[in-house]
Image (cartoon, rainbow, N blue to C red):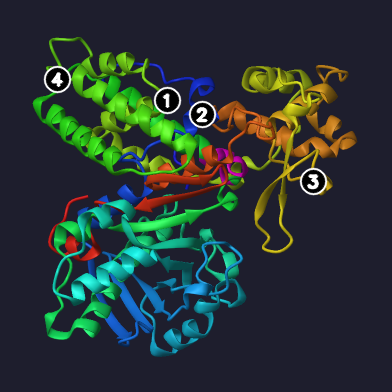
Amino acid sequence: MDRPLPHPDRKAALPLRPPSEVMRLARMGSAHPTRLSFLRVLLRRVRNEGWRFDRPVWEVDANGVGRAVYRATGPDRTYCLVAFAHDLPDEMRSDRVIATAWDATFALFDGEPTVADLDRLQANVPLQEAGRIGPTELSLSRANRSVRLFNHVVDSLAAGRQPNREEVDAVGYLMRTTAVYGSGKFGAADRDAIAGRAELSGPFQAEMLSVWLTRAFTVDLAEHLAAAKGGSAAVTLDPEIKRDLGVGNSTGLGMAPFLVRHPVLLNNWAQAREVALARVRALPEATPEAVACFRDALAAADENASLWRSEHPIQIAKLADLRRDLRLVAERTADWPAGEALPWDALWRWGEDLSLEGQEALFALLLEPHGDLVDDLADCMSADEASAFRLDGAMKVGALRAVLSDHFGWALSIDFTAPENAARFWYVSEEKLEPRLGNRFDESGAELEMPLCIARLAVELDAALASRPANEPVAAFLLEHPDHRYMVRRAQIAKDHPYAEVQDNLIADDMLPIDLMRCKLAFFGASRFDPRSDKWVRISLFQGEPYPSDMNNGGTA
């Protein structure tokens, strides 16, 4: 459901940051998770609605092979993660999408599976793409162990001691997912089938629930193997160490085009964030409770930054910026607020001199104390994309050119005859049907290019319109030039959705796909971004957050 965003400010009016500032790759690639991130939205819902969690099935042997079911019972419906544990030889373990075997595979089941359902899933889910699931399955996923840490934890617990904290902090998860598929893939339920459910209407709520329950499975499996190995001498994980373990994720180029393909959704995500920031900046005072929460969030961000590791040159530099800027924020707020008018706005304006990494971290910090003011915006982040699909053929060419000038001026200034501005091309690999990025002047296949460079399409459309009469209906133009329908539609979408476009050249030689990936992952709620190249990143989900069993005892989110 596409819900209109509320007015940005309940008490005073402050303008939103312009798309020309917000929707640039460098800033998007510096995004941090916020309380509007999708996993935080899920955790608040299950806490507020009193969901109950248990594990009705645990059929895993001493070698760590078998199946388990994790049940989540909400006020209206029940969902179950069906997990399959495998004995995977080391030489078969791979994070690449072309892998055919994994340490664990999963399906999120709509309702409670029968034994027959479990048997059917056991015959298909471990095969992943090679198997088939049905409309009772909401997601399909797989995960591999972080072998060194997983074995260290099992061996330590089996010997009756806790794992080394430095080892835990260095990795941060026992398993990492390499794919979480939903929305109709491989036979799973279509998005339309669940979009009307309150608990799943928000973006990626089924996938977040699946990953959260997977986190519980990873710890349970490690403790189970430790008990099998150590017998009565074995111990379970210390709660503090357990809380510091998330679920890793290894993500490649397959994720990058999503934000380009879903302009209305991207607009709603970005605009909700901007409305939240405007609301906070408009507050006339900083209450002691909000200031205390801000300081707690700053301390947590500082600790996270100190533990965050990467060997990639880009992220090493960004981490240095982040750590420096968090120290500057701490210095700036040591005796803050000190009688400033609009203190949150003053803090934000001061922070505009920080690096992009620091600015985006400050963004998250400003939102954290103000759940009562901003959390309702999570209800505005889904989208009815079908409603935006229809073309307005009655629009006049002159009006369309004005839209291009107003909303795509950033694109019209790019010279695509310059090789550096057209150096890349996006295509779909024949082997895995996944998006890939090629070098136009060094590789073949450019004739199979996907229409992901919106900037070039805008330039081509504007050139085609230049000779047309201003009062000509767009429908007449498209009858002669149907190849421009896609870009006309995007221009008409942008007219009413100002944050719908990534305002950068996505085929430039210096474009970093990882910026798109980090932006989307930050919306998910990911942390500890660790690029392995400009096309592949590892992250952590739910690190530091409660487990499902904690919610049974009133855990906080």
Q: Secondary structure at mark 3?
A: loop
- Tell me which label, 4 or 2, sits earlier in the chain: 2
Residue 83: which quarter of the image? bottom left
Q: Amino acid at mark 1?
A: Leu
Label 1 belongs to which residue? 356
Residue 184: which quarter of the image? bottom right
Q: Which residue corresponds to the image point at 36% horizontal and 78% vertical from the top-left?
A: 112
Q: Secondary structure at mark 4?
A: loop
Quick check: 422 above or below 117? above
Query: Which residues are drawn in magenta?
Result: 258-265
Residue 119: which quarter of the image? bottom left
| Badge nearest the viewer, 3 or 2 | 3
Label 3 belongs to which residue? 443
Label 4 belongs to which residue? 334
Q: Amino acid at mark 2?
A: Ala
- Tell me which label, 1 or 2, sits earlier in the chain: 2
Q: Position of residue 475 (x, y in %)?
A: 81, 33
Q: Residue 340: which disc?
A: none
Q: Which residue corresponds to the image point at 34% horizontal and 51% vertical from the top-left?
A: 39
Q: Position of residue 338 (x, y in %)?
A: 13, 12
Horizontal relation, residue 114 to residue 475: left or right? left
State yes or no: residue 381 in magenta.
no
Mark 1 and mark 2 residues within 8 Å of each other at the beta carbon? yes
Residue 44 seen from this side: yes
Q: Residue 26: which disc?
A: 2
Q: Residues within 10 Å of mark 1 (few under 14, many from 20)?
A: many
Residue 276 seen from this side: no
